[in-house]
Amino acid sequence: MPDSKDAPRTVATNKKAYHDYFVLEKFEAGIELFGTEIKSIRQGKLNLKDAWCSIDGGEIFVNGMHISPYDHGNIFNRDPMRVRRLLMHKKEILRLFGQIKTQGCTIIPLSVYFKKGKAKVEIGLCKGKKLYDKRDDAAKKSAQRDIERGMRVKE
C-alpha cells in the first residue's frame, strides 16, 4: 500500500493559464522558500493567478506569485509578492531559455504541490492563445457537456 506522504498533494492550480495559453511542455521545479512561507503554503494560502517566470543569469525565477503572510509569523514574514528562485537543472533552464527566444513562448507556473514533503512547482512552456482559439475551446467544452447530458438522460 503506498504511503500517503509519497502521493503528491496539490495546493493550488492556475486555471487561468489553461484558458489563456496552449501548454506545450510541463516541467517540475523545486522552489526556494523561507519557513513562514512554507507554513502558509501548507495552509493553502497561495495564489498563482497572475504569476509568470523569468530567466536571468542562468537562473529561473517566479514573479507575481502571492503567498499570504503566515498568521503566527511575526517579524519573520516576507513580502508576499517577492520574486522567488526556482530550482532546476542548468541544462533544463538553458533549454527553456532557447525555446523562449526562438519560439516566442512564455513560462507560466501551472500548479504548486507537495511531493515527499517538499513544495514543488509545475511550470509550463506556453504559447498565448488568440481570441478565436479561446472561443473554439469554449464551444468544444459546451458541445462535450451537451453530449454527456444526452448520454445521462438516455440511461
Image (cartoon, helix red, strand yellow):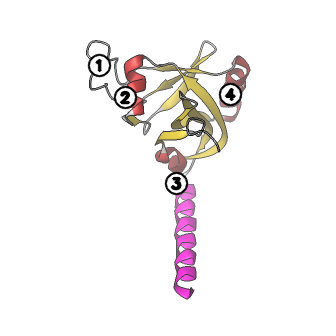
Q: Do the residues bearing badges 3 and 2 touch, measured as CB atoms within 8 Å?
A: no
Residue 69 in sight from this viewpoint: yes
Magenta stretch: includes residue 139: yes
Q: Earlier in the sequence, mark 3 or mark 4?
A: 4
Packing grade of label 4 (10 A; few <14, some 14-19, many >=20) is many
Q: Nearer the viewer, mark 2 or mark 4?
A: 2
Quick check: 108 above or below 84?
below
Cα gap from disc 3 to disc 4, whole angstroms = 26 Å
Query: For residue 145, which numbered disc appears in the image?
Result: none
Residue at mark 1 = 73
Residue at mark 2 = 40
Viewer-proximal residue among 148 and 7: 7
Residues rendered magenta in the picture: 132-155
Residue at mark 4 = 96
Q: Do the residues bearing badges 1 and 2 touch, measured as CB atoms within 8 Å?
A: yes
Question: Percent from the top left, x then y, of residue 16?
Answer: 47, 46
